[in-house]
Amino acid sequence: MQTDRFFASTRGRIAAALRRRHSASAADLAAELRLSPNAIRQHLAALQREGLVSERAVRRSRTKPTYEFSLTGEGERLFPQRYDVLLNAVLREVRAVAGEGVVEQIFDRMGRRAAEKAAARTSDLTAEGRVGAVVDLLREHGVEAEYSSDGTAYVIHEHNCPYAETVKEHPQVCSLIHSVLGELFPRGSRQTESLATGGVECRFEIKA
């Protein structure tokens, strides 16, 4: 299975939606992907046969149980991952050889460069355009991300993090996104939830 071709297909879109939502019914997926529930069920059945999706009954109300689907471990492996293991090992060596301060300096320099590139890339965009550009940047790096707005703030939602395990040991990794947000949104942004600390997503709120 060629990964790029798979994610361009309906089954790939279903897999991406399940990873973002953690679990969903055929009706949920049909509404999101604008397909019929029957078409979704056919694709889910194929994904189940391939061992990429599992099914379980959940009770959402007093009515009969709803069947929800989620990715299996094999399905999760379709997505970029395990870079965190190598990065953690490298950072441990840097810290052992040169000290914690050098780790801080590395991410400070990387954060400044990332912020400068993002600023140049979004200099002519509106605030919402810059939020969308950040989401696009995250997606380019293997993060399932989207944003929402309630009129007073924009909220960026990261549904997965390739480096969540690294962040637990080396929180400096998160300084990259904070540097970018600080550069693009000088009125203020803050992180209100983190996958690395047990949250269901990484959530960043930006003043509109």
Image (cartoon, helix red, strand yellow):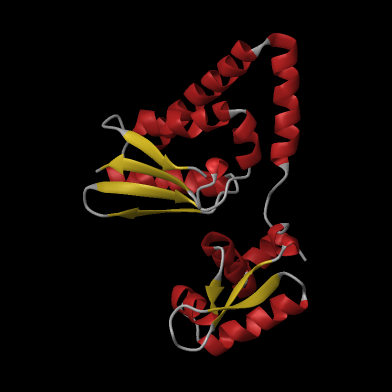
Residue 45 in view, yes or no? yes
Query: In this image, 124 relative to 97: left or right?
Result: left
> Residue 34, relative to residue 4: is it above or below?
below
Q: How many marks?
A: 0
Residue 126 in view, yes or no? no
The quarter of the picture where residue 150 lies is bottom left
> Residue 24, relative to residue 39: is it above or below?
above
Quadrant in the picture for the N terminus: bottom right
Query: In this image, 49 relative to 10: left or right?
Result: right
The quarter of the picture where residue 207 lies is top left
Q: Looking at this view, is 79 or 69 the one in front?
A: 69
- Residue drawn at (65%, 35%), measured in percent from left and top? 166
* Furthest-left residue in this view: 152
Query: In this image, 120 relative to 18: left or right?
Result: left
**Residue 132, image x, y percentages:** 39, 49
* Furthest-front residue in this view: 62
**Residue 67, image x, y percentages:** 57, 81
- Residue drawn at (61%, 34%), measured in percent from left and top? 168
**Residue 177, image x, y percentages:** 48, 34
> Residue 124, relative to residue 56: is it above or below?
above
Query: In this image, 133 relative to 38: left or right?
Result: left
- Residue drawn at (24%, 43%), measured in percent from left and top? 208
**Residue 174, image x, y percentages:** 52, 32
